[in-house]
Image (tube, coloured by chain):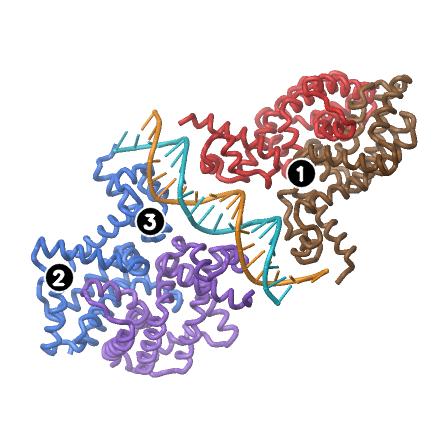
Chain colours: A red, B brown, C blue, D purple, E cyan, F orange
Amino acid sequence: MKSKQETNQRILSAALTEFSTYGFSGARMDRIAKEAKINKAMIFYYFSSKENLYEVVISDVFSRVYPQMMELIKSEPTAEVFLEKAAEFYVRIFSRSPEFVKMIALELIQDPGNITSFLKEIFEDKAKETGFVGPARLKQLIENWYEEGAISEGDPFQFMLNVVSLSLLSFLGKPFLEALLQYSVPPEDFEEKRIKSVVNLLKRGMLK
Amino acid sequence: MKSKQETNQRILSAALTEFSTYGFSGARMDRIAKEAKINKAMIFYYFSSKENLYEVVISDVFSRVYPQMMELIKSEPTAEVFLEKAAEFYVRIFSRSPEFVKMIALELIQDPGNITSFLKEIFEDKAKETGFVGPARLKQLIENWYEEGAISEGDPFQFMLNVVSLSLLSFLGKPFLEALLQYSVPPEDFEEKRIKSVVNLLKRGMLK
Amino acid sequence: MKSKQETNQRILSAALTEFSTYGFSGARMDRIAKEAKINKAMIFYYFSSKENLYEVVISDVFSRVYPQMMELIKSEPTAEVFLEKAAEFYVRIFSRSPEFVKMIALELIQDPGNITSFLKEIFEDKAKETGFVGPARLKQLIENWYEEGAISEGDPFQFMLNVVSLSLLSFLGKPFLEALLQYSVPPEDFEEKRIKSVVNLLKRGMLK
Amino acid sequence: MKSKQETNQRILSAALTEFSTYGFSGARMDRIAKEAKINKAMIFYYFSSKENLYEVVISDVFSRVYPQMMELIKSEPTAEVFLEKAAEFYVRIFSRSPEFVKMIALELIQDPGNITSFLKEIFEDKAKETGFVGPARLKQLIENWYEEGAISEGDPFQFMLNVVSLSLLSFLGKPFLEALLQYSVPPEDFEEKRIKSVVNLLKRGMLK
DNA sequence: GATGAATGAGAGTTCATTCAT
DNA sequence: TATGAATGAACTCTCATTCAT
């Protein structure tokens, strides 16, 4: 009775929560149906199988994050601007969508090959569409910065790993440290504090 | 007719691989049995249930990592020494035991509360045993360094989050960046390169 | 917006194909709808249920075959004429409508009781309508032929079983023998060859 | 508790009944389990899937019928002996195992290609094993009989179709004629009567 | 009449766990 | 201790059928 679009979205949203909480095998179609307030059979009507639903969810997550990452690269920023903006962007988006972090981390743990091929696909599609090859351009940018003497880390791999770990992945570490140091930081405060700390660390640590 | 000890170990080792690869729900008792080369029923004889087996595996992982972490704290290092040693220690141990990273990350994603209570337990036990309360002492150390003007990050939470993200969690990011930048780093090289990059970043970024 | 009649026919025709190919349980309403190029719900609008649709299809098949069988009996043929005409009639009709053979055979296998009661019904209807009781008359005919010394098989049951097996049921044996003897007979040739062989066998074997 | 062999047999036997009664799609794993007095999961433990169970049942049926058919051919009988023995053999075996008739007929209706490839396989296996190619030899025999002037039907295909239809397939026609002629023949009587009628018909109709 | 979305009752299959030996 | 057979609960998926428009 509701529009096809809406039902589709409700299923996807429920599935994101479910998969990011329990992982693929732990996720239950019943729970997704209940959460989406539809009959269980509808999920299969819309998405054919659990596996396919999972893939759609994953690609949904990536296609929401991807374009914004590319914007920054396209703008040809200086190293300083890049570090500021990238850190801020990652921290904000993942602080507000913890499910994204979980989904991506789960994939990285359980099937890294899947992400590999998925990203390749997305890049090739986008490259065909827009003629712009993000990753290659990013690598060039970093190499240029290093040659110009703007940064101290010359290896693009380590450079980006530092960025990604401190922003995206640090969200996984939060509960760990809350347990270790026995106190918790409310999410509102955390976002701003985290941005400050990461930007400061990255700029002092990697800019010359 | 192998010794009790040995069978026990074979099960635990197979279980570690299985759980770290597939997560709790995705793990299969059959596969663990096959890998451990014993009858499935024996796993229940030794560990009574899947859940219990999982808990033993997790606590096994932690109890291998924990004491070494505490050693460093006990030695009352300067900030500089701490950053150097911590980074090196984390990178080395997790680079050589990728299953540990996966297990810990899976727990952080799917049941952070579990880690919280588990760590609390371990700390209390150790505190009773040795009279030494690691986490509390670590917090103090960091606060002291800040007061002395040795470091620029005064929040112990952010300070440690930076350390942990760059070392432990960065291993999750490796496959992601291999896909993104389209090249892969062999594990041997990776360990040394990573230590250098992390130590450099942490020292330049957080020491005054 | 096709005429009611036409839609009805399209459904019946699709259903015949489907049921004769997959049997009652194996048949899928979706496939029938697709084949008939209408919406699945329409089948229920026209035929209320799968079971009812099946019954209509079955009775459709019988009511196409039945009257022609009766004509022959009514004409009070000699044994020789009967054998010639019956064999030819059966072979031709079932050679051209393999679905009929399949439907009837499936019914005979899976629910012989159904055919029993169905035939009874049809006979009673026809008897009331026309005053002519086909099966009873047929039995009489055969008994008469035997008494007259025209045929060597005195049991009407065996007599008719021979006729029916060699004509109708032999179509089921065709693929079996194609597999067994490793060669296949094209349908065009088969019809004429089969008639000749059956008529010859029946006449030589049962006429005196 | 019971021996593996026995359970296996109980499942196969229950499955034969179920499949021959309801067809593949209509068959229910629950019913098979109940009939075999075991837990439903055991069927999958022994046979992996419904489809595989079906295939095993089918091949079981064939491999029970096949060797006996070959014996007769091997004995190099005269046409007369062949017709007598073949008819008797077929009628007896299928009169006592109505499930066999049903299984074979169902396959012939719903997936004749399956039988084709299955028979080919069985022939090739047996040919390798024993060096004896049954079907080829049978064809030769019939051709010889015709050349010698012993039989009137020169086409091996029609010859065998007559034999098979009158014996094997006639069991399908039984309920049909019971309905048509409104009386039923008890199985005990039927077997002997049928043999007599078929042998008589075949010999008078096809021998010269 | 006609459509696409929705539903409920099962069906096949999986899997942790237990039993008999 | 050790094993293979057995079990029950739960899970994914299917399908005839109905509803709202």
Q: Which residue is mark 2?
A: C134
Task: Classify the position of the C terminus of chain D by image quarter.
Answer: bottom left
| Depth check, front residue: A87 or A20 | A20
**Which residue appears at 51% of the width and 37% of the height?**
A30
- Picture coordinates of residue D6 (x, y %)? 51, 68
Would residue D116 be seen by someone viewing this image from the given angle? no
Q: Chain of mark 1?
A: A
Q: Which residue is mark 1?
A: A112
- Between the C-alphas of marks 1 and 3, the distance is 45 Å
- Picture coordinates of residue A32 (x, y %)? 52, 34
Residue A168: name its quadrant.
Answer: top right
| Depth check, front residue: D93 or B54 | B54
Of the image marks 3 and 2, the number of the one nearer the N terminus: 3
Name the front one of labels 2 and 1. 2
| Depth check, front residue: D164 or C62 | C62
Amino acid identity at mark 3 = Glu
- Between the C-alphas of marks 2 and 1, the distance is 75 Å
User: Tag 2, which secondary structure?
Assistant: helix
Q: Chain of mark 3?
A: C
- Between the C-alphas of marks 3 and 2, the distance is 31 Å
Would residue D12 be seen by someone viewing this image from the given angle? yes
User: Tag 1, which secondary structure?
Assistant: helix
Q: Which residue is mark 3?
A: C18
| Depth check, front residue: C68 or B105 | B105
Amino acid identity at mark 1 = Pro
